[in-house]
Amino acid sequence: MNTDIKNMPKDLFELTPVDNNMNEKIERPSLTFWQDAWARLKRNKGAMFGLIVMSIIILLAIIGPSMNSYTYKQQIQPIKNYTKLHPRVQGLEKIGIANGIEKSGKNKYIEKGIEKDYFWFGTDELGRDLWTRVWSGTRVSLYIGLLAALVDLLIGVTYGAVSGFYGGKVDIYMMRVIEIIGGIPSLVVVTLFILILQPGLLSMSLAIGLTGWMGMSRVVRSQILKLKNQEFVLASRTLGASNFQLIWKHLIPNILGQVIIMTTFTIPGAIFYEAFLAFIGLGLPAPNASLGVLINDGYKFIKAGHAYMMVIPSVIICLLMLGLNLFANGLRDALDPKMRNL
């Protein structure tokens, strides 16, 4: 045994020199939390697809109504010549797509002597340009979704933070209030709210927001309960921080990721709820337009062979919902990677 050791080459027993500078060298660039989240989000193909779809629809909602000379409520004169015209697009009509020909084979553009006119989404029963109305309606639906999410954010975060931070009887009473409100069907509350304040953008947004904040408050409460006894909170309290400072300067910033995720999911929910209310007759008053109002109006003319009035806004709201949900899912995984494995 000893002989074998003596016969071994001395190189095996030499220590490799250690470069302490190389051991302490940082090979990867230092990233902040938000930079790391953005990098993870970019690697999520579904989220990026949703972001692209959502961005295109938002861009068209901004510039779409100004791409022609019509307004969303303008009736093109003479009205009898411009009612229920099927979509007609330059270039596509030559290959048999969007050529203005109805299912029966009629071409009202030729019959009424308006061959030079093009309506990319057609016109409705009152002779209004649907391209302008669809994108104006998309803008209104996005506005309702954002305003409802803002109301949800302000009430839900504040209510949940106070309930979770103070705990005890305060938490018990505040949670009982949520249970009572949650026991009332939200459709009943929204319907009464709209009937009292009259249908409109503000009343509908407030109605949807005031019935949707409870989910946000529960998430915020659970996160506050988990963090309020952490060392950094106790240290701040020892240094003299007030309860207000502890909540808004220490606890809320640490749950910002979950709040952003919940807010992102709230927007498509509010848009869908607005469309549902419009479909049952509680939508915006005429001549205002939203995607829900357009779908409801188009539904009446399906059997008459004018399905495009309903199909076009339906496709847009489906793409918008798909884009928002894909982006929200990707954002959830980017801000909280652990949730991917749940």
Image: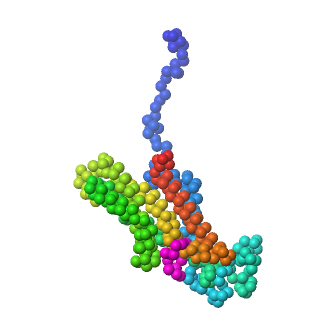
Question: Horizontal and vertical percent for residue 302?
Answer: 64, 74
Q: Is residue 340 left or right of residue 306?
A: left
Q: Is residue 280 magenta?
A: yes
Check the image and report above or below for 118 versus 241: below
Residue 120 image-quadrant placement: bottom right
Q: Is residue 127 left or right of residue 274?
A: right
Evaluate whether residue 63 shows in this view: no
Residue nearest the observer in this picture, 235 or 186 = 186
Question: Horizontal and vertical percent for residue 64?
Answer: 58, 75
Span highlighted in magenta in the image:
279-292
Q: How is the image coloured?
A: rainbow
- Residue drawn at (40%, 77%), measured in percent from left and top? 196
Evaluate whether residue 11 shows in this view: yes
- Residue drawn at (53%, 59%), measured in percent from left and top? 325
Check the image and report above or below for 20 versus 90: above
Main secondary structure type of the part rendered in magenta: loop
Q: Is residue 148 magenta?
A: no
